[in-house]
Amino acid sequence: MPMIMAQDSDKYPLHRCVFRGDVRSLAILSGAYDISEKDKQGNTPLHLAVMLGRKECVQVLLAHGAPVKVKNLAGWSPLAEAISYGDRQTISSLVRKLQQQAREQMEERRPNLVAALHQMGDFYMELKWDFQSWVPLVSRVLPSDICKIHKSGASIRMDTTLVDFNDMRWERGDISFIFNGDQKPSHSLTVLDNKAKLFQRVRYEETELEIEDEVDILMSSDIMAAQMSTKNITFSRAQTGWIFREDKREMVGAFHADFYQINGMVLESRKRREHLSEEDLQKNKAIMESLTKGSSQGFKNGEPPMRRASLNPPPESNITWDEYIVAPPGQCPLLGRNLVYKESSKSFKAVVAMSPDFPLTVDMLLNVLEVITPFKHLSKLRQFVLMKLPPGFPVKIDIPILPTVTAKITFQEFAYRHDIDPELFQVPSDYFEDPMRFPDL
């Protein structure tokens, strides 16, 4: 056993430096070792630095490019652990770094994405969304929409009446989303409000005020983690007929399609609130509403908005490095606050219709969706299509997007076209720029 301890203890030099608060050695070693390496608990050095309140170690690791969007075995990111610990400066640093890393990853993928769009034929496509719920009366008020997508060269335009759909709230409008892949990044993404005749360039960077607003929201609300688990998914052919059962085959628009039942989809939701006081929980709804409506945008009476203060740190951990490193996987010793934790899971069945006739491939669809996924309901579709689907193209999909809401998505029209008007991808000359028309983009 002592031999195993010694071996384990020497295994993760960056983690060990963080645990012991050895900032100097960490700075020297960070360039020589894998800064994203996970230990037996799935923690990166940044996870440990945040959980232990080692602020200087956090800054050293971020300066060396430590990844922020990475989860440990318990399913939590360094940002989630930073919110739990409650140091405002650390949370702000992680939010900034997370946004920077997201931009860098998009820029890395961008040349391949643009090349793939150029290789694809030009086309027009219609995507129909119907939102439904098993909750009585809710389906009556849920929206539906037809997305019209034009693609020419490395440019894509999507016209929609459903601006966004999230947590049972949605915004209607007459919106066009334009991506010009051959433009420089700061001009490649534009959203048009066709009713108000306004346009907004989708910025790659948030202002300091927006970052501080986001930190206030994070510090005032539950730490949430929700994911659709696809580990145990199975596909079975959907059946039709009362007595003589046979595999279900139908036309979806102009396309022959085989229908499959998807079993084993589980939505896992987890929330933590050890960083919130009783008073917070009472005020939480009001705080969230005021922040998400952007009430702190701009200074009132010339004074900056009141900002949420850092929490008092949790008690210092007495766990030693040797005790931590020999703990079995999944049994991480408590390094921060006592968790206040709630977990729930819900099983779903979904249906997908796969067509061998559809002219687009799944890979091509993913390239298109990557461009237009700032809209949350479209990013859910992208997550679904990334699964290992049966052969063909998913021309019709029923997927859960919220615990009580299912989206029915139908690719009802597709045609390769050579006559797509290039002006579709330009901002009309009579539109005015409004940088804050869509504050969430």
Image (tube, grey):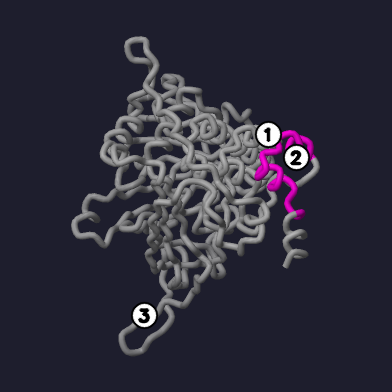
Element on which disc 1 rests: helix
Badge 3: few (under 14), some or many (20 or more) residues near its Cα, within 10 Å? few
Furthest residue in direction top, as rendered: 302
Can residue 232 be seen here?
A: yes
Looking at the picture, tell me which residue is in the foreground, 116 or 351: 351
Residue tagged by mark 3? 240
**Amino acid carrying mark 1 in the image:** Val
Mark 3 → mark 1, Cα distance in angstroms: 61 Å
Considering the numbered disc 3 on the image, is that residue within a helix, a strand or a loop?
A: strand
Pinpoint residue 47: horizontal percent, then vertical percent: 59, 46
Q: Looking at the image, is 306 positioned above or below residue 373?
A: above
Q: Which mark is on residue 237?
A: none
Q: What kind of residue is marked 3?
A: Thr
- Where residue 59 sits, quadrant-wise, is top right
Q: Is residue 118 visible?
A: no
Q: Which residues are magenta?
A: 10-31
Q: Could you tell me if the residues under marks 1 and 2 are in contact, i.e. CB atoms within 8 Å?
A: yes
